[in-house]
Amino acid sequence: LISTDSSFFDMFTFDFKYGNAENVLREPNTLVITEEVASKFFGDRNPVGEAIMVNQDQAFTISAVIFDPPSTTILDVNVLFPWNYIEAQDRYNESWGNNSILTFVKLQEGSVDTVVNRKITEITNIYKENNTIDYSVASFSGIHLHSYFGFGRSPGAILYVYIFSAIALFVLLIACINFMNLSTARSSIRAKEIGLRKVNGASRGRLVRQYLSESFIQTLISVVLALVLVLLLLNKFNHISGKDIEIGGLISLRYLFGIIGVLILTTLLAGSYPALYLSALKPVRAIREQTDQRTGSGLLRKILVVFQFTLAVILITGAMVASKQLTHMRSADLGYNKYNLVHITLRGNLNQEYEMLKDIFQTNPGVLSTTASNQPPYRVGSNSSGIDWDGKDPEQDVLVSFNGVHHNFTETMGITLQSGRDFSDAFPGDMYHDDTLSNWIINGTLAGIIGKEEIVGMELVFMGIQGQIVGVMEDYHFKPVGDEIEPMALAPLPAGMLQHMVVRLAPEEPQKALNFMEEKWNEVLPQYPFEYNYVEDVIDDMYRTEERMASLLKIFTVVAMVIASLGLFALASFTAQRRIKEIGIRKSMGAQEGQITWMMIRDFSLYILISLVIALPAVWFIARWWLSEFSFRIDLGPGLFLITALVTTAVAILTVMYHAFRTARTNPVLALRYE
């Protein structure tokens, strides 16, 4: 639901099914609805001109129907009503300190943001005395991924784009390194072919083109198989990620060019070095199969093995950090008791029925207490800088979050009071008088900023409302745990101004009490559905995005580790094959199977050790950078990195051990019978 004016459709593009942009949102009691809403209430007929009741007592006339916006838009709207309807209620008109209204401005071509920012601040200074806030514009195209900017979406979505782009690149590099290593390691198989081609006049350039062509064909087959896997696994991916990606949305020139770009890049990454290496072989030595007796231990191949396991270690550690941070946030002390706490949104005029509902609900012993608030107590978005107290530095600018609440708020929420008391109907000052007089409860953060020893009893002026501080509550998370706890002030408001009812249930039989509440609701308000949420479930949903990202990160980490291990497995096989005669001689000279096994494992263990030395410091810096996005975060202790080191080393050793054991048990006679 958006309140706006007719210029909304001048700035944003929406397709109209019925009506047009010129004649909408000009009259106070008119609406623009989406196709989905029109279908729900009016079926297939044209609803323009029809009346629809809002809050059971307000008639609005539908002036237009727009097609449903795409699911990817941040302007997720179903109903638009005129801004002059809000103005008629004299809300926000003179409040220059209020920042809850989103304002969109279309700048002229070539406008400089810094100049616009300065002009906006200058205008505000004219109308707001002692203004200390600088205003700035934000690019609309950047809002979707970079900042929620009032749209109720998590900030930092671009961070996940960067993370998963890096993961995709890591996985691709690991696969390319496998291809390069195995191509060069098995060069002796193609040695005679290379020698004969060169003897017959094939130039190096021609050989390079041949091997790049082979790499291209193999990559093309891989791309086709990958697209098939995308088709098969897309629904599963959507389920895990919470997205709604459709195949049709991937069929476009942009994605086609992207796939072609990946195809060419992978061909060059995977095929360039083998092509240059193989084409450089000397024809005589190639025909004699003397390509490189040290191929199995080539320096570049060792570097590539180290590099790919460095990437794998970074992914493993990153997945562990993400999982641990998510667990840390979900198990955090919120500062209130989220269990057996029910939230009911009092839509429309239902807040006028709060007192009646409270009295009815509390007749059940399973209902311990009730309260109400202007905003959901677990997600408060309103804040202002208009605060003052005795002794405050005039230059000090404090942005304070605000929530209007009813009596027994801290008791019902389970918030501990540091000093003072809760709001109660036993105190006249806790009753709403007018817009200029009210008592206050503040949180510990704001109390710390005020810096007085005796906070309770102080006079506080906030948003033009003067009153006495009657309580200081412990800090509680009224936003997602990852966000820093901000200064907060609570003021008592009448139930008729509060849209959110909160009910504390007894822990013994909460469902029984909830059934009672639903039964009584249906008796007194049969025209309204009984809609509720457990606060515990709402809090869990807040971390759903991070949970999904952590799951995807684990999956991609496993994929990367499997690919790296497959490459190591194949390389170990080749190395064992190339050293079969050496091992035969060693066994003939009395070497034990354990000694030979250790010899094989030792070389690869050294590669893994070097990978850990490089990767762990790098991932420590990366993890610190990512965790800096959260004010409530884990400590990066040595235990986490030790687990990563042990897991990576164990996987590598187990991968190599198969070939090490097999080679160590080879009969030396079989290895040396042709010598």
Image: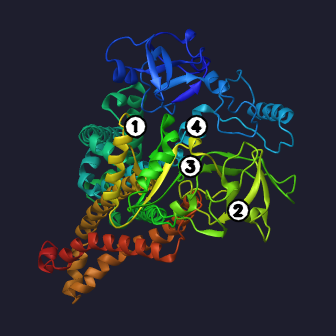
- Label 2, label 1: how many angstroms apart (C-alpha)? 69 Å
Residue type of the residue flagged with mark 3: Ser
- Label 2, label 3: how many angstroms apart (C-alpha)? 18 Å
Residue 180 appearing in the image: no
Q: Are marks 2 and 4 in contact (CB under 8 Å)?
A: no
Nearer the N terminus, badge 2 or badge 3? 3
**Residue count near mark 2 (Cα–Cα under 10 Å), binned few <14, some 14–19, many ≥20:** many
Residue 378 appearing in the image: yes
Q: Residue at 48% across / 30% down in the picture?
A: 55
Left or right: 28 as drawn, with respect to 197: right
- Label 4, label 3: how many angstroms apart (C-alpha)? 29 Å
> Which disc, if any, is residue 373?
3
Q: Residue at 34% across / 55% down in the picture?
A: 555
Rendered view: 612 above or below 561: below
Q: Position of residue 186 (x, y in %)?
A: 27, 57
Rendered view: 666 above or below 246: below
> Which disc, if any, is residue 32?
none
Q: Secondary structure at mark 3?
A: strand
Nearer the N terminus, badge 4 or badge 1? 4
Residue type of the residue flagged with mark 1: Ile
Q: Nearer the viewer, residue 4 or 616?
A: 4
The residue identified by callout 4 is 143
Residue at the far bottom in the pictured view: 590
The residue identified by callout 2 is 470
**Residue count near mark 3 (Cα–Cα under 10 Å), binned few <14, some 14–19, many ≥20:** many
**Residue count near mark 4 (Cα–Cα under 10 Å), binned few <14, some 14–19, many ≥20:** some
The residue identified by callout 1 is 264
Q: Secondary structure at mark 4?
A: helix
Rendered view: 549 above or below 306: above
Nearer the N terminus, badge 2 or badge 1? 1
Nearer the N terminus, badge 3 or badge 1? 1
Instruction: Give the quadrant of residue 657.
Output: bottom left
